[in-house]
Image (spheres, rainbow, N blue to C red):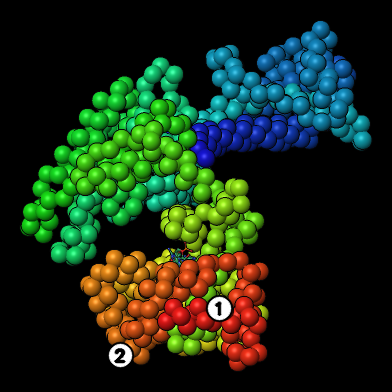
Amino acid sequence: MFSWRRQLFLIAILLIASIGGSVLIIKRTIDDLLYRDAVSTAQNWAGFLAKHVTDLEHISNGEKPSAESLFFFEQAREVGRVFRYKIFDHDGNVRLMSDNLQAAATKPLTLGEHNPAAARAIAMGQPLVTIEEGAPPGRPSFYAEAYIPVAANGRRIAVVGTYVDQTEKRAQFNASFPFAAISIALLTALAFGLPAFAWYRRTQEKARAEEHIRFLRHHDLMTQLPNRKYLIESLALALATLPANGTALALHCIDLDRLKDVNNSLGREAGDGLIRKVAERLRVVVPQNDMVARLGSDTFAVLQTNVTSVGAAEALAQRIKDEIAKPHVINGKEVCIGASIGVTLAPAHGNDVKRLIKCAELGLDKAKKSGRNCIRFFTPEMAAKLDERLEIEQSIRDAIANESFDLHFQPWLNLRSGRLTGFEALLRLPAHGGDFVPPTVFIPLAEEMGLIDAIGMWAIRQACRTAVHWPPHLTVAVNLSPAQFLAGKVASVVEDALTESGLDPYRLELEITENMLLSDADTVLAELGRLKAMGVKIAMDDFGTGYSSLRYLWRFPFDKLKIDGAFMRGLDGRDRNVEQIVRTIVALGRSLDLTVTAEGVENAHQLAFLREIDCDQVQGFLYGRPMPATDLAATILADYWRSLPVELAPPAAEAHSESVAHAG
Ligand code: C2E
Ligand code: MG
Ligand code: MG
């Protein structure tokens, strides 16, 4: 793509070339006109002469002209623009000249004066014209010499040389030439210039639109600051060109503290205004050669170059923190916020874009955990954590690519009947050495990586495919992440999984946690409504650990409450308060017609208490740990034996039934 200056230059060149071309064409046309005029004048004159001079052939042969011819020659010495004429013989020798008629009258002219042009004209049988510049008064300043062969009875008898004065004709043409030249040049300029101008304008507009698109791709609209993509590109470039002379670069990751409070108290628009003000301050406080970018809603980054010491990076981080801490006036109100800042240095902490961003984020995490509104540099201790994290991230990617995730299933029982009711599907990420990375570790990472959606969908499909082979009274429960709801595809994915596997919708239970309802409760509840309409059951997982907002229980008809395992551990301390809370949750569930399941049941004491308060279901290590799908048959079979009358049950099943009964 040419720059606009280059395009303008090209247009100017083309315009000049077109005008110059027009001038040349006109000049050539005038020359041609003068030539044709000379030929036609000379031919007329020669014809006229041949008609009146009857002894032309004799004269051409060197004889004296007759008295009539001589009289004609005298009269015709100067006719119109013909200021001279000559008669040549076959060989191009002069036999008569208008300048020297006396000589012709007295004696034949000498044959010495030979004219090659005349000889050529008679040889070719065609007029031959040359245009000459003359020197007045001897000759006109511009004239044509025309040699016209004259034929009689099919023979070429002579050549009449005619000298036509074209000075005036040329002056006439030239007088009209500038006007014609300018008119044609203007027309050419218009014919060419208008489309060229339109093309130029279009090119400019296109270039501007492309520039705008490029800007949008690389900037955050609200603050006009570079976005994450632009920061990553700039960081990669800065790292690639990092000088070997010891100067380094620092990446500051800045998170605004208390922006949420501003959003909640003054409204979202005020929050946006605050973000814009912070962006403005960052622009001012950060040196011009360095970059300020907005990474997320309340997260910014600063790429500091030419860092000569850790102190320099520390000083900038401090200035940034101080600047953000100064009061901001929003909607006429003074608002004070703070900033947590994580800083990393390159090449000291790494020379890879992804790693450095992670390092800065880890520094930021540390700053937030240290009470916020402070600066924390990335440290080598964090590096070990980072490596572990990067390794898990890679395992997640590999597991997605190779479909090597696994689902383990943990049984849950009906406490009253002691019968197996279903299994909860729990995701497992295989790690090196046959171990598994716990879901509590890799699921938050997968959520951050934006991959939980795909993983969660796989879990739903896989759980349905497995459960369809179980006895029809058994249910399968699958956990869902908030991110899965963002895509708004949960209902359709569940529907597909049920259709594909042939599992009855009533045998599928989906577990959600309260935090899922915090961000966009309406969307989530609407999606849950669609699922429930399909016949799928919805359970509130980990109840009692989050906000335990009863509002959601009232807004959505859940089927089940799962009391978080932490309460079972609390029961072991014989804490009356925990007992009271668990009792209340069970009573609440009962009053709302919900099934209540206690999670994390590990011992007989917990079980006894749950029986006492009439909890519906239990799940925990006491009954079975999460196990691979291939191991479920034994559990299902044992449950089947337990359902048989004692006399039919094998001894092992009998023993197990007794242990459950005994625990009760
Ligand atoms: P959760 O849904 O509350 O699952 C119960 C967790 O408690 C499981 O941990 C289970 O192994 C553990 N557990 C069960 N009984 C006992 C017990 O008696 N004692 C103790 N100490 N622990 C017990 P796990 O498998 O590590 O899963 C942890 C969490 O990861 C799950 O909590 C769930 O929130 C999440 N998760 C698991 N699979 C998935 C999944 O497919 N998708 C999503 N989004 N989250 C999942
Ligand atoms: Mg669960
Ligand atoms: Mg749970």
User: In the structure shown, which secondary structural element does the residue marked by tag 1 occupy?
Assistant: helix
Numbered circle sitting on residue 591: 2
Q: Is residue 530 visible?
A: no
Q: Is mark 1 within 8 Å of ligand 1?
A: no
Q: Marks 1 and 2, Cα distance to the nearest angstrom? A: 33 Å
| Badge 1 amino acid | His
| Badge 2 amino acid | Ser
* Contact flag, marks 1 and 2 (Cβ < 8 Å): no
State the image coordinates of residue 524 (x, y, percent, origin top left): 38, 75
State the image coordinates of residue 6 (x, y, percent, origin top left): 47, 34
Residue at figure coordinates x 57%, y 79% from the top left: 655
Q: Residue beneath label 1, please?
A: 656
| Left or right of residue 311, residue 436 in this image | right
Give the answer, above or below, for where 242 lies relative to 319: above
- Crowding at label 2, few (<14), some or many (≥20) Cα neighbours within 10 Å? few
- Crowding at label 1, few (<14), some or many (≥20) Cα neighbours within 10 Å? some
Residue at figure coordinates x 59%, y 28% from the top left: 166
Residue at figure coordinates x 47%, y 35% from the top left: 352
| Left or right of residue 259, residue 163 in this image | right
User: In the structure shown, which secondary structural element does the residue marked by tag 2 occupy?
Assistant: helix
Marks 1 and 2: which is nearer the front?
Answer: 1
